[in-house]
Each structure stands twice: as structure tokens, then as C-alpha cells.
Amino acid sequence: MNWNPFSRKDKTSSEVDEKLDSTHTTAGKGRPTPKRRDAEKARLTPIAPKDRKAQRKAANARRRERENSEYEAMRTGDLRNMPKAEQLPWRIYIRDYVDARYNLGEYFMIVIVVLLFAALGATYVFPQASLVILILMYVYLFAIIIDTWIMWRSLKKKLIDKFGERAVARGMRSGYYAWSRALQIRAWRLPKPRYKKHGNYPK
């Protein structure tokens, strides 16, 4: 009987080594294990979009859709879907107050166009009349300035009493908002006036 006391030990050690090699190869899939620093760097690397042009195009389409929706809301008077700035309570008050007045500035475009054509016609027929028309144009512009100043002075007091100083703060640009709306033809104003005629002053 040939018995070798070390044969089983050798065989066992050989089997363990083979299993370790097999496990290491399977876990690593034939590749060396990456260093921790490299693995963290790979995770922190931002993933760039595959198609930047498509993303930009989609973003522009979403923006146009939002702008069209807001324009339609201002045209129809849908306050909930208007831009956030137009939903401010003091801006609503400013619009209603300006729309209720007969502003000299709301006829600005019409009057200026008429006077310009009159001045051109007078140049060929009666040149001296051109000077008169020019004077009338400056008088009208000066009257608009006075009327707008009176409007804003009264409106500013009402805004402070109702909404506080923040309604007339510089960042709110309430004065410019009221002035620019007063110079627009009533039918062209956006958001549209809530009332068809003048005289409906806000409370």
C-alpha cells in the first residue's frame, strides 16, 4: 500500500488555487481591477448630451410655445396664464386706471401721422403752413407730457395707499409701465383692457 500523507494536502491546495484564479478572472472579466481614484474620476465626469443641437431646438420650441400661450392669454384676458409680472396686483390696478382715463397720449400715433402728411402737403401748396403745423406738433407733445405727469402723480398716491411703497419702487418700473400704456392706442394694448369703454376706474 502506497500511502502518501502529503498527497491530499497538495491536492487541496491546488484546488483552492484554481478556484481563486477562476474567481478572480470571472470577477475581473479578464481585466485588471481599476484603481479607486480612476473609478471616482469616471463617476464625476459629466455626461455630455448626445445631441446638443436637438436639445437646443427642443428648448426653443418649448419657449416659443410658452410665449404664444402667454400672448394668447394677454389677448383674451386670461389672467392666470399671463406672465408673472402681469399678474401683480398693482400692475392690474395700473392697467385699469390708465384704461379708464382719456389719455392724450393714446392718440399720439394718429395725430403725428396726420400732422406729418399735412406738413408734406403744405410744403407744395402753402409752405408757410408747415411752420404752423410744426408748432402744433410740439404743442401736442408738450400737452402729452403734462397729461402723463398729472396721471402718474394721481396714480402713484393711489398705489401707495393701496399696496404700499413696494408698488412704486424703482425695480417695479410702475411709472414706465403706466406711461407706456398711456401712449398706446387703446385697441392695441396688451393685456387687453378689461372694459370696452373709458370711465371704469378701479376701487
Image: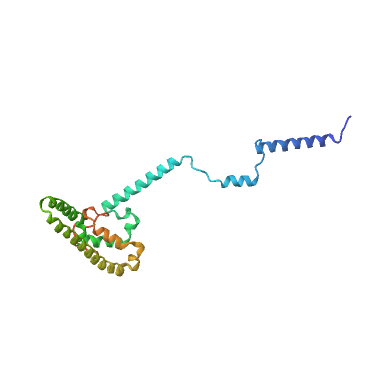
Looking at this view, is 138 or 175 the one in front? 138
Residue 165 figure quarter? bottom left
**Direction left: furthest residue:** 125
Residue 108 in the image: state x and y as whole percent: 20, 57
In the rendered picture of this protein, how many numbered marks are placed on residues? 0
87 left or right of 98 in image: right
**In the image, residue 105 above or below residue 34:** below
Give me the residue at 64% from left, 46% from top: 36
Residue 166 figure quarter? bottom left
Looking at this view, is 185 or 112 the one in front? 112
Q: Quarter of the image containing the C terminus?
A: bottom left
Give me the residue at 12% from left, 56% from top: 128
162 left or right of 17 in image: left
**In the image, residue 133 above or below residue 160:** above
Give me the residue at 26% from left, 51% from top: 76
Residue 55 figure quarter? top left
72 left or right of 37 in image: left
Looking at this view, is 53 or 63 the one in front? 53
Q: Quarter of the image containing the N terminus?
A: top right
Give me the residue at 70% from left, 35% from top: 22
Residue 17 in the image: state x and y as whole percent: 75, 37
Model colouring: rainbow
Residue 85 in the image: state x and y as whole percent: 34, 57
**Residue 150 in sight from this viewpoint:** yes
Residue 126 in the image: state x and y as whole percent: 10, 53
**Direction right: furthest residue:** 1
